[in-house]
Image (cartoon, helix red, strand yellow):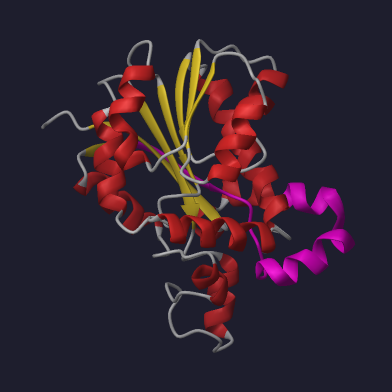
Amino acid sequence: MNDERIDLYQSGYLADYGFESTMVHYRRKLLLGRLEKYRPMVVIEIGCGLELLYDAWLQDGGEVESWIIVDPAEIFAENAKQSNLPNLHVICDIFEHAVPKVKATLPRTPDLVICSSLLHEVPSAIDLLTAIRCVMGRATLLHVNVPNSESLHRRLAKAMGLISDTKAMSERNAKLLQHRVYSMRSLKLDLVSSGFEVVESGGYFVKPFTHMQMEGVAPLIGTDVLEGLYLLGKEEPDLASEIFVEAFRGKHE
C-alpha cells in the first residue's frame, strides 16, 4: 500500500466510522478474551486503529513485557505513540517492509501476533502472511480476524436480489480500498497456502443489516440485543459478521 492509498484509507476509515465503532467494541471484546486465554508477554499487533487494544488490555489488568504496533498510517501510529503506554513500541511502516525493524525491536520470539481486520484490505494477503511468518517462532500463535462473506446480512442481500454473490464487493468495501471478502474456507486456504497450521477458528456478532442500516437500528434495539448478537455470532460462526482463525507455523516446512 503506497502513501496515497494509505492517506485515502485513513480518510475513508474516519469518514465511515459510524457503526464501525460498535464493531470495534466487539472486535476488541473478542481479542481481550483471546488475550485472557493465552496471556502472552510479547505481542506484535499489525494495524491498531484509534482505540488501542493494548490500552484496554492494561486496564483489564493484563501484563506485557513488550507490545509492538506496526501501522503505516501516520494518524494511527502517532496516536499510539502519544498514548505513552508502558513497554509499547510503535513502528510506522507497512509490515512487509518493517520486518527487520520488528526483529530488532523484539526482546525475544513473540508469543502472539495479532492481525485484526486487516488481511482483507492489503493488496497481497499472501505477502503479508509470509512476512508475518518471518517474525514467528514455533510456539508463536497468529490471530487473524476478517469480515465474513457468508454472514447473515450478505446472505439476506443475496436472497433479496441485491447482490448476485455473497463475495461481491460492496460500496463500503470499495470506499475503504478493501481487496477481498473472505469466507472461512478461503481464509483458512490462504493461511495453509502460506505455511500455517490452523488450530482454532470461530466467529462473533451476527449483523442482520449493513453498517449504514445498523447505525440507525442500534440505538433502538439497545445494548442487551447487541450483546446477544455478539454471543449469537460465537454460537453460529457461519452467520457471523466477522470470523477469526488462529494458527501456528506449519510443522512441515
Prevailing secondary structure class for the magenta stretch in the rendered image: helix
**Which percent across, then down, holds residue 252?**
11, 31
Identify the residue at image location x=59%, y=41%.
76
* Residue 58 image position (x, y, % from top left): 66, 19
Q: Position of residue 198 (x, y in %)?
A: 31, 38
Task: Determine whether, in the image, residue 195 is placed left or right of residue 159.
Answer: left
Q: Which residue is situated farthest in the left direction here? A: 253
Taking the magenta stretch, the answer to whether it contains residue 220 is yes
Q: Where, by quadrant of the figure, is residue 16 drawn?
A: bottom right
Bounds of the magenta segment: 199-228
Q: Is residue 95 above or below residue 109?
A: below
Q: Quadrant of the N terminus?
A: bottom left
Q: Nearer the viewer, residue 151 or 182?
A: 182
- Looking at the picture, does residue 45 appear above or below residue 8? above
Q: Is residue 198 visible?
A: no
Question: Residue at position x 73%, y 60% from top?
Answer: 18
**Would residue 90 be found to the left or right of residue 180 on screen?**
right
